[in-house]
Amino acid sequence: MTDDEGAAGEDTATDATSEADDEDDGTIYFEDVEPGTVTQCGSTTVSREEIREFAEEYDPLDIHTDPEAAAESPYGDVIASGYHTLALSVRLLVDAARGDRAVIAGLGIDDVRWHAPVRPGDTLSVAFEILDTRPSESNPDAGIIHEAITVTNQDGETVLTLENNELVERREPAEGAE
């Protein structure tokens, strides 16, 4: 995903505001999304307090909540829950790009992988690449977008990868649909 070059050698990198150039209201429809497009979604810094608060509520393992116990772990300190990292990535995606996309529903997340721990003070950046798109077979008013999401830390180290599938409204129904 680090390669921003399209198959024809053209630069397909974009920021989150350029997915839909011709829509007056800014809504991004299925037809506006092109495979190969890479979108940078910004960054967020993870604090020790955020790690503890999330973990106490949703993943209360000592490695996330107890600095003394975590100091004895292979990590030497608390680390963020993988689910916290996933939640932060979703927030950045929605804030940067998905708020304008005409999403009907998420269809599923595949191949979630936590590659490295997220530590207090880490700054996480999120990018996604459109892998492919296809019309929905069951809903002529929608299409399916398949994308790869990568989260990196301030050192460029990949901490999380996943693939996501979304059902997105079409601007107009597919031909032959009523």
Image: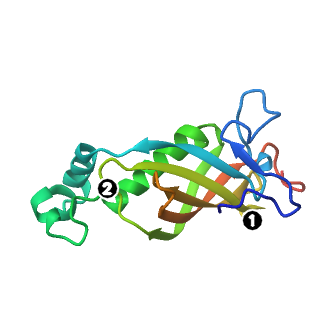
At 31% from the left edge and 55% from the top edge, which residue is drawn?
A: 119
In which quadrant of the rendered view does residue 6 lie? bottom right
Q: Earlier in the sequence, mark 1 or mark 2?
A: 2
User: Would you place residue 103 above or below residue 23 in this image?
Assistant: below
Q: Position of residue 31 (x, y in %)?
A: 80, 48
Q: As displayed, is residue 101 above or below residue 58?
A: above
> Looking at the image, is 126 positioned above or below residue 2?
above
Q: Residue furthest top?
A: 24
Residue 68, horizontal then vertical, whole percent? 10, 60
How is the structure coloured here?
A: rainbow
| Residue 77 percent coordinates (x, y) | 21, 60
Judge the density around disc 2: few (<14), some (14-19), many (≥20) Cα neighbours within 10 Å: many
Indicate the quadrant containing the N terminus: top left, top right, bottom left or bottom right.
Answer: bottom right
Q: In terms of secondary structure, where does tag 1 sit?
A: loop
Q: Which residue is at a point 78% across and 45% down the rendered structure image?
A: 32
Mark 1 and mark 2: Cα distance apart in space: 43 Å
Badge 1 crowding class, 10 Å Cα cut-off, few under 14, some 14 to 19, many 20 or more, is few
Report the residue marked by disc 1: 137
Find residue 41 and report its horizontal and vertical position in percent. Answer: 57, 44
Q: Which mark is residue 46?
A: none
Which residue is painted at 72% across and 27% down in the image?
A: 25
Q: Give residue 79's quadrant in the image.
A: bottom left
Near-viewer residue (158 or 89)? 158
Q: Of all residues shown, which one is farthest toward the front? A: 155
Q: Amino acid at mark 2?
A: Arg
Residue 66 is at least partly visible in this image: no
Looking at the picture, which amino acid does disc 1 mark?
Glu
Task: Name the disc covering residue 119, or none.
Answer: 2
Q: Secondary structure at mark 2?
A: loop
Relative to 160, is 121 on the left or the right? left
Marks 1 & 2, CB-CB < 8 Å contact:
no
Camera-near label (1 vs 2) is 2
